[in-house]
Amino acid sequence: MRCLVTGCAGFIGSTLTDRLLALGNEVTGYDNFSTGQREFLSGALDNARFTLVEGDLLDPDRVEAALDGAEFVFHLAANADVRFGTEHPTKDLHQNTIATVNVLEAMRKNGVRRIAFSSTGSVYGEARVIPTPENASSPVQTSLYGASKMAAEGFIEAYCEGFDMQAFIFRFVSILGERYTHGHVFDFYKQLRAHPGVLNVLGNGKQRKSYLYIQDCIDAIFTAIEKGQAKVNLFNLGLDEYCEVNDSIGWICDELGVKPELNYSGGDRGWIGDNPFIFLDCSAVRVLGWRPKLNIREGVLRTVRYLQQRPELLDRR
Ligand SMILES: NC(=O)c1ccc[n+]([C@@H]2O[C@H](COP(=O)([O-])OP(=O)(O)OC[C@H]3O[C@@H](n4cnc5c(N)ncnc54)[C@H](O)[C@@H]3O)[C@@H](O)[C@H]2O)c1
């Protein structure tokens, strides 16, 4: 396949790019390096089947040119940080919704018919049904990030209907593992490296979350694309387990051999839009045969060990 991967230098996009190349595909990677890391592409750049386009998705002409000849688009580029949404109220709209429409328009103009999209469990806001199925009724949005991704999903669905495209929409829980550069393990490890005696925790630490290891996430994407037949294929991607933030703190501290004093900011939410209980029903992708290999604790530990080997990443975000 000739694929275009947006966000190819990011945590998930670079891992997906490596997997696509390993499977023999031709890949054009598109990234503006706003949060992407050039070194994550070092393997890809050595591969003759990889082409890098440095560009912004908010530049429609450049996106259109990059899609020339593509058969499949993996659209991962986004502002992936849910936490700071209210500090820049229009960023999610531009980076997540308008950027997605630019990708869809470029696909339409180039006759590219298939897209995989990285959405998020944040679109469920604070779901009333847990574990939350894909068809949970009318979720109320609690973050600008979730709202922007929900809107992007809507545009993708409408383009599928209007222009005979096929979509694979993935609503991820938080992803962990090698090349991880944002999220709670990153924040906690960064703090503990600087001052092992104290850990500041947003909220009361009792938030319940689910996490998925990056390679298991990529496996699930490929299973879904191989087997999904619908015009719009919508999948939650996560594990059939969750943990408390406090559990994760315990695993991280044991791994590092530290016993910090824990300073909680208090309340059952760490920030505006923080969902105190995220647990998705992932039976739809499991029915297709996908099985994750790592549990949450193993994913957290792999992430800590990766960051220990790559401390320079801690200063990049
Ligand atoms: N990491 C998670 O836990 C998680 C969970 C749910 C959903 N997602 C989604 O998965 C996708 C990838 O997330 P990630 O964790 O790899 O994030 P990331 O920040 O590591 O990667 C995003 C990439 O997109 C690029 N990018 C951003 N805006 C761009 C633009 N306008 N034009 C071109 N390139 C641009 C960045 O430079 C970066 O390389 C995102 O869509 C995110 O919303 C991630």
Image (spheres, helix red, strand yellow):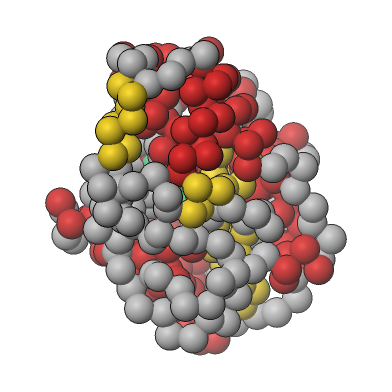
Residue 243 in sight: yes
Q: The C terminus appears in which quarter of the rendering?
A: top left
Percent x, y for residue 38? 44, 25
Task: Tally the marks.
Answer: 0
- Residue located at (81% from left, 68% from top): 287
Position of 144 with respect to 26 (left or right) is: left
Which residue of the protein is positioned furthest toward the right in this rendering?
289
Query: In front here: 256 or 173?
Result: 256
Q: Does residue 72 appear in the picture of this structure? A: no
In the drawing, does residue 184 fall left or right of residue 217?
left
Residue at image coords 65%, 80%: 231
* As drawn, 229 above or below 51: below
Vertical placement of residue 91 versus 195, above or below: below
Q: Nearer the viewer, residue 254 or 139?
A: 254
241, 141: nearer the viewer: 241
The location of residue 92, given as percent across then percent down, is: 28, 59
| Relative to 62, residue 248 above or below | above
Give me the residue at 33% from left, 16% from top: 197
Q: Residue at x 27, y 64 (%)?
A: 144
Residue 26 placed where, x, y %? 67, 42
